[in-house]
Amino acid sequence: MRVLHHMEDGRLDPVIARFGTVEFVYVPHQGDIPQDASGDVLLTIPRGYPNLAELLDRGVEWVHVTSTGIDGFPLELLGDRVMTCSRGAGAIAISEWCLAMMLAFEKDLPGTWLSSPPERWFAADLGALYGKTLGLIGLGGIGTAVARRALAFDMTVTAIRRTAAPSPMEEVKIASSLTELLGRSDHIVVAAPATAATRHLLDADALAAAKPGAHIVNIARGDLIDQDALRAALDSGHIARASLDTVEPEPLPEGHWLYRHPQVRLSAHVSWCMPDSWDLLITPFAENLQRRLSGLPLYGIVNPDEEY
């Protein structure tokens, strides 16, 4: 078996060492593809590969994307090939980032940090996660990890999900509609995949239905939120804060209003980062490669038509 990949800097060395009978062929993500570069499997990331169409035609039957989201992958090129992804691999880091943003909002961080004597000691107008309601848009691996951590803070957790399947956690209730979820949530975490159906899911009407003073955390994709509508909701004070790790477009151009809005906390799509983040992202591929070599069905197969 041959695996075509774009991974540089020795990041695949542990996997290569584990699978001694598999040939791993590095292919630059730009420029000409070597004539002898062909393989059964393509290990890739979902963005920025202009030679992808030609590469897929080199015998590829299975594509693995080293991310949870596959929205940047040109699905029209996939054909009848099988696609898997590293769904949920970033759940630990991303869920911790969400709780950090929620705590920063409630505890006014870093606003309460001191660099000079304050006007008063021993008192501050601070909130708490205790007793608050978290609304999860999406209840996959990441949403479930956020829920588990929020429950540890004695929050009430409500979610909305793509399917009619019951909640995977007894303590997490499923809302009957997005409007219901938004109207009762103090903190709203966006954790749904980016599809045609979820583009601008949080538009002007949805934001108007949100509980006044709500805090929105987006760790999914920027285009799930209508950013013009978000700006209006922030300016009016109806939405108290937006903590955004994903925006549209990425990278965000210099001078964009999101950089300077006082009620926006912006980061550079880094919520997935932690010391072992790459190991977590590549583990689902390695496990599936072992399954393929053993003649077992792959797990985590992507359905390109799924919504949220």
Image (cartoon, rainbow, N blue to C red):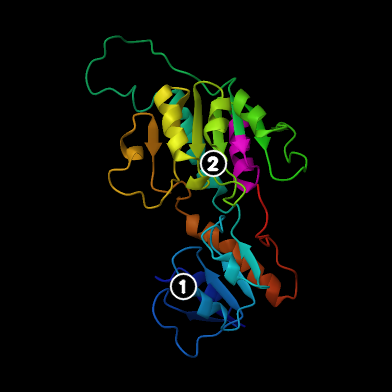
Can I make out residue 120 in this image? yes
Q: Residue shown at 54%/29% (left/top)?
A: 187
Mark 2, residue position: 95
- For the N terminus, the quadrant is bottom right
- Of badges 2 and 1, the one in the foreground is 1
Q: Mark 2 or mark 1, which has the lower sequence index? A: 1
For label 2, the crowd category at 10 Å Cα-Cα, with few meaning under 14, some 14 to 19 and many 20 or more, is: many
- Residue 263, how many percent across, how many down? 38, 29
Q: Amino acid at mark 1?
A: His
Q: Nearer the viewer, residue 268 or 89?
A: 268
Magenta segment, prevailing SS (helix, strand or loop): helix
Q: Is residue 196 left or right of residue 163?
A: left
User: What is the distance, in whole Å, between disc 2 and disc 1 at their CAs?
Assistant: 28 Å
Where does the magenta region start and end? 136-152
- Quick check: 93 above or below 75? above
- Residue 184, how many percent across, how many down? 62, 23
* Marking on residue 6: 1
> Magenta span has 148?
yes
Q: Nearer the viewer, residue 175 or 67?
A: 175
Q: Residue shown at 66%/27% (left/top)?
A: 180
- Quick check: 130 above or below 140? above
